[in-house]
Image: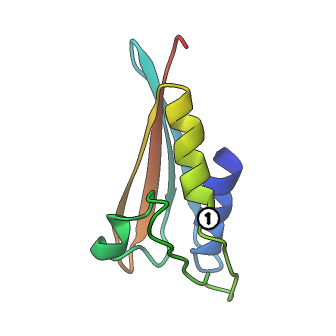
């Protein structure tokens, strides 16, 4: 999951941009965040990122191609472990992908 989120952040960032990873522990869960300052995601695409019934791929800043399955697999793995995944984004300013996992599985 982390590798997919990190490679996506790098793929959709411009050379020299930074990618940040944050971790926060709550009483019953932990939250992990991968944040970039890249191209961002339009609101209409953000709403369907984790849906398997809507195929969507975006070309990276260096022309990289994706399959459109990475985020769907991340969602499946996280939910199988009792967690949640979501994204926040502003086109032209970057995206932040967050997921939570319970501390006790």
- Picture residue at 28% right of the left edge, 72% below the top: 43
Q: Is residue 39 above or below residue 4?
A: below
Q: Residue furthest bottom?
A: 63
Residue 58 occupies which quadrant of the picture?
Answer: bottom right
Q: Residues within 10 Å of mark 1 (few under 14, many from 20)?
A: some
Q: Where does the image place residue 48, in percent across and percent down from the top left?
A: 37, 65
Q: Where does the image place residue 93, in percent across and percent down from the top left?
A: 39, 74
- Picture residue at 68% right of the left edge, 62% below the top: 7
The answer to which of 71 and 52 lies nearer the viewer is 52
Q: Where does the image place residue 12, in percent across and percent down from the top left?
A: 57, 74
Residue 64 occupies which quadrant of the picture?
Answer: bottom right
Report whether 6 appears left or right of 52: right
Q: Where does the image place residue 99, in percent across and percent down from the top left?
A: 47, 40
Tell me which colouring the rendered structure shows. rainbow
- Picture residue at 48% right of the left edge, 25% below the top: 82
Which residue was labeled with disc 1? 8
Location of the N terminus by quadrant is top right
């Amino acid at each position: 999951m982390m590798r997919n989120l990190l490679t996506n952040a790098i793929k959709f960032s411009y050379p020299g941009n930074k990618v940040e990873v944050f971790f926060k522990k709550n009483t019953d869960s932990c939250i992990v965040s991968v944040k970039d300052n890249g191209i961002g995601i339009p609101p209409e695409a953000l709403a369907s990122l984790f849906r398997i019934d809507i195929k969507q791929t975006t070309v990276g800043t260096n022309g990289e191609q994706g399959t459109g399955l990475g985020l769907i697999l991340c969602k499946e793995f996280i939910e199988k472990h009792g967690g949640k995944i979501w994204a926040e984004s502003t086109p032209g300013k970057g995206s932040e992908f967050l997921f939570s996992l319970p501390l006790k599985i």
